[in-house]
Image (cartoon, helix red, strand yellow):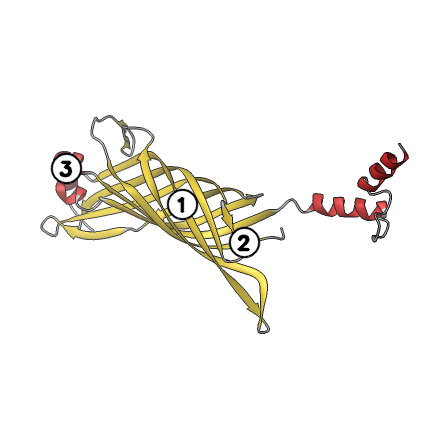
Amino acid sequence: MKHLCMLLLCLSGMMPVQGQDRMDPADTCTRVELESKNPGIVWRIGFNLDFVFADFDDFADVIGSYNTDMIHDFVLTGPEAGVLISDFYAGVFVELGYLYDYCTYRDSLVVNQLSSEYGVNLGYDIISSDKIRLTPLLSFRILRLRLKNYDNDSKIPLTQYMNDRDLDLRFSQSAVTAGLNLDYKIYIKKDGEVTESYWTLGLYGGYIGKLDKSIWLWSQGNRLTTDRMMNLNHFTFMCSVSFPINDL
């Protein structure tokens, strides 16, 4: 019985094991407090370059092929802010596409496109080493595109405007993506020495699909109904640059 009590005291840290010093209970409490104050939270600020391949050929007979030939893809850039907690990642992003502005249709019509995207990323780090970070990502996003047509001349008669009214359509499509993101860590040097601070270059590739089969379509003042659809190429990829922030 005496030996059992001594063994329990050794395991509890109240009695030193042979060859070791006695553990101070105050040191144990201090270590627990430090661990509780450092739960492994890392904030991340990044910038994405996103590619989504689509076509609107189903709308060609309504809005003209000179419009659908132009709005077939999304190339989007924008910031992402996220947090990494014990290998779990959650982030939100907002991205804008390029604004095209050129003349077509006998040089009398301007076709103008502005695309945007916003959504959330959810993931878990399956590999997190000193050099790389590999994360399966699940994303929920809204793709938006605004298409405008108007006369190339800055001044036109009112009667001409009433006969050839401006086109202003807003397309919205919900989508989900699932893929892998690979980040390569590049450490920052200070006074010729490598520090613990770093930034990352990332590459993402995955599958994208529509959450809603039908597209949402608006004009300036109306919700428009249609059975036509936007077609998605099911492969998407993204390049990114990000900066972890440990102290906030």
Q: Gap between marks 1 and 3, in whole Å? A: 35 Å
Left or right of 36? Residue 67 is left
**Label located before the other in sequence (1 or 3):** 3
As helix, strand or loop, the secondary structure at mark 1 comes to strand
Q: Amino acid at mark 1?
A: Leu
**Label located before the other in sequence (2 or 3):** 3
**Label located before the other in sequence (2 or 1):** 1
The picture quadrant where one finds residue 29 is top right
Please name the residue that numbered disc 3 is placed on: 60
- Can you give x and y, in whole percent of width and height, for residue 98 in the image? 30, 51
- Can you give x and y, in whole percent of width and height, for residue 146 in the image? 28, 41
**Depth check, front residue: 30 or 223:** 30
As helix, strand or loop, the secondary structure at mark 3 comes to helix
Residue at the left extreme? 106
The label number, if any, that marks residue 92 in the structure image: none
Please name the residue that numbered disc 1 is placed on: 180
Q: Quadrant of the N terminus?
A: top right
- Can you give x and y, in whole percent of width and height, for residue 166 in the image? 20, 40
Q: Is residue 18 visible?
A: yes
Left or right of 234? Residue 48 is right
Q: Is residue 173 visible?
A: no
The picture quadrant where one finds residue 13 is top right
The label number, if any, that marks residue 244 in the structure image: 2
